[in-house]
Amino acid sequence: MTDRRSSSRRSQAWFGAQGRSGMLYRSWMRNQGFGHEVFDGRPVIGIATSASELAPCNAHLTRVAEAVKRGVWQAGGLPLQFPTMATGETLMRPTAMLYRNLMAMEVEELIRANPLDGVVLLSGCDKTTPAMLMGAASVDLPAVMVTGGPMLNGKYRGQDVGSGTHVWKFEEDLKTGRMTEEECFFAEGCMARSDGHCMTMGTASTMACVAEALGMQLPGSAAWPAVDSRRMETAQAAGRRIVGMVEEELRPSRILTREAFENAIRVNAAIGGSTNAVIHLTALAGRVGVELGLDDFDRLVREVPTLVNLMPSGTYLMEDFCYAGGLPAVMAELLGGGLLHGGPVTVTGRTVAENTAPAERVDSDVITPLDAPFQPAGTGIAVLRGNLCPDGAVIKQSAASPHLLTHRGPARVFDSPEAYHAVADDPGLDVDENTVIVIRNAGPKGYPGMPEVSNVPLPAKLLKAGITDMVRVCDGRMSGTGYGTVVLHVTPEAAVGGPLALVRDGDPVVLDVPGRALRLDVEDAELARRRQEWTPPAERYVSGYTWLYTQHVEQADRGADFGFLRGGRGHEVPRDSH
């Protein structure tokens, strides 16, 4: 390789330095066996990996990193792997969402503090993908996302079962006596039978697709199963590509434009994606200075049908989606119908239109055509307004029961998810199929962290009576693998004095999804009187990260990011202390 020591690359502030400083940086790196020639000015590529056995969806990413390294070496770069925290939704308490912002801060600072010219982001579970995108966007060095891929389809007694989605179904079967404890124990091992994240269109799969739709992930790479050899091929290709991105100075700020976000919102509707994408995209937009509001998520999807027939809204799973053509086939269909912007540049250096040109839909049952969609336009995420959610709330229409999208019923109020679970199996619980279950104090500040608790299971007595869905209203989130008529992200949350804090048992709650309304049928004067009586909950945290979180987290309609992290801070090389 030709000598490139004169390069002005960022990494050369370290490895190209003269005198004692340069000697220190290079000599300590050489204890890993690197020869002097790797410090010749070639691009230094960081491989940020969230691999962790405490985050099962990400546990295999160490092997993915090895494939990325091969690609970086092939393209003439120097790959350097480094760990980040892993926010795994499956194990972390009280919720991984509490730590998304912390992970984003860590990713940002690690990239900025080290001699890197570009970075490959390895993620998997729900919050790791947005956290890495947020951190990388704030630094604005060339970056490409590589998600770890979904698990293979679950298999139980001759049927496909979906991680997450079938947890709720099996729980209902257990409560109603259709399934024994032994059968349930066996079935849980059938859901997660390979490396990878949830293979339903839950939040992990959604955010992988969203990263691809934004242009931050290589075309087609969101859907390859974690254990498919082409997952490693994709990772290797990303390693090659990031070197080219450094040469071209192709940064996130050039990719994450307003049009790219509009594409991601419409793709999320077409795939039947998670409501969590609303929060993550809003937070990411805040990092790059793109104005994105809740109403954009409603307005932009009204013309977009659901094209992908995947659980929890449909029948199939991510493995089927991959082999049916994956996200490029969906994007090509939307582009052909005039529903996507074709011009935004992507990590390939090519436009969306150029990337999707070779795409092919192989299975029209899994990925339906635009003129015969799985669900018609207007069945995606809806944004609600009203005196119960003046700053907005969301509902995933494709996962809801059509007959409940217009509903009026009495509230049954619980001050926490735990308070509901304590009585949910009580045969004397005063609820019927018309009741609106209200769960509050589950928002960003109130829980804290805004956990995925909104789709609480139905009361056991109603399940046994054959009731399969009820309206539920909450200031928390719902897993992307979940389903039901659940109003989420009610803003402002109860803990900061939002109207949800004023609801009392028996109050009439009116849900009108076609009219985009959620309201409490209580006189304004009565609500004003209740507000005078309301007192904010006592502060539970006086130190540590959770205190920092509760003091600075913004509301759901602004992405639940920290206010002080909005906007970018760039990649200026820190001072040399040597």
Image (tube, helix red, strand yellow):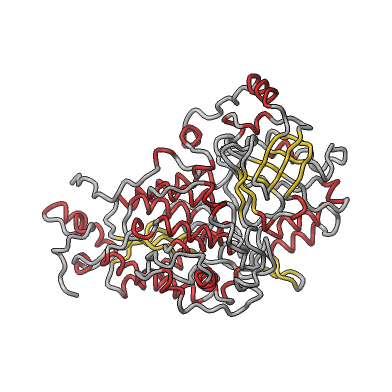
Image quadrant assignment for residue 195: bottom right
Camera-nearest residue between 513 and 28:
513
Q: Residue at x 59, y 29 (%)?
A: 497
Examine the rendering and report whether any part of residue 27 can be seen: no
Image quadrant assignment for residue 22: bottom left
Camera-nearest residue between 558 and 297:
297
Residue 58, given in percent of the width and then of the height, sits at 51, 60
Relative side of 323 to 397, left or right: left
Residue 301, given in percent of the width and then of the height, sits at 57, 57
Residue 54, given in percent of the width and then of the height, sits at 54, 54
Camera-nearest residue between 153 and 463:
463
Q: Quadrant of the N terminus?
A: bottom left
Examine the rendering and report whether any part of residue 170 can be seen: yes
Query: 145 above or below 297?
Result: below
Q: Residue lying furthest left in this view?
A: 19
Residue 537, given in percent of the width and then of the height, sits at 60, 26
